[in-house]
Amino acid sequence: MNAYDEYMKGIVKPMREELAQNGFTELTTAEDVEGTMKTLKGTALVVINSVCGCAAGLARPAVREALEEAEHKPDHLLTVFAGQDKEATNMMRDYFPEVPPSSPSIALWKDGALAYFIPREQIENFEMEQIKDHLSEVLAQVCK
């Protein structure tokens, strides 16, 4: 591993752990994504994680809080890390080709199809509470 990749691995470690410690399964390879998505049953919340400030200060906290408050939670919590696990992220994005690439972003998957998508444009420049409330409403509709 070159010096840059090693440095970035250390930088993103806490960003990865923030979701992993909250029950998310981290998919780091295209094979992980394909194997998981092909056999997935029920609902899944998929977070396309990112190094950017709107992921750190908005998306990840909003996801955590929305899940804490949710009466009905998704069956699966999944995450890929854009810019770090490129093949995994590209493979995940292949499952919702109608949506332009966006990170961070949040997808709700239900019964083999994309049920809802929150792109970066609906995360960046919003308050964390607004994103949490938006996601909470979506979880209530999709996961009931």
Image (tube, rainbow, N blue to C red):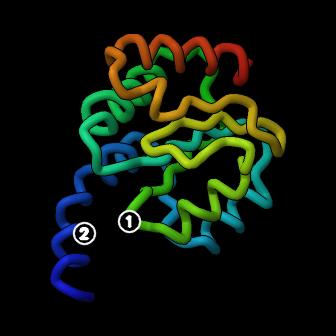
The secondary structure type at the circle numbered 1 is loop
Comparing 126 with 14, the one in front is 126
Query: Residue 62, position in %: x, y?
Result: 39, 24
Residue 116 occupies which quadrant of the picture? Answer: top right
Q: Name the residue under label 1.
A: 84
Query: Residue 79, position in %: x, y?
Result: 50, 50
* Residue type of the residue flagged with mark 1: Gln
Q: In this view, does 142 lie to the left or right of 11?
A: right
**Furthest residue to the bottom?**
1
Q: In this view, does 9 lie to the left or right of 16?
A: left
- Crowding at mark 1 (Cα within 10 Å: few <14, some 14-19, many 20+): some
In the picture, the quarter occupied by the N terminus is: bottom left
Q: Mark 2 points at which residue?
A: 9
Q: Residue at x 53, y 20 (%)?
A: 135
The secondary structure type at the circle numbered 2 is helix
Q: Which residue is drawn at 16% across and 83% down?
A: 3
Whether 117 is drawn above or below 96: the answer is above
Whether 11 is drawn above or below 21: the answer is below
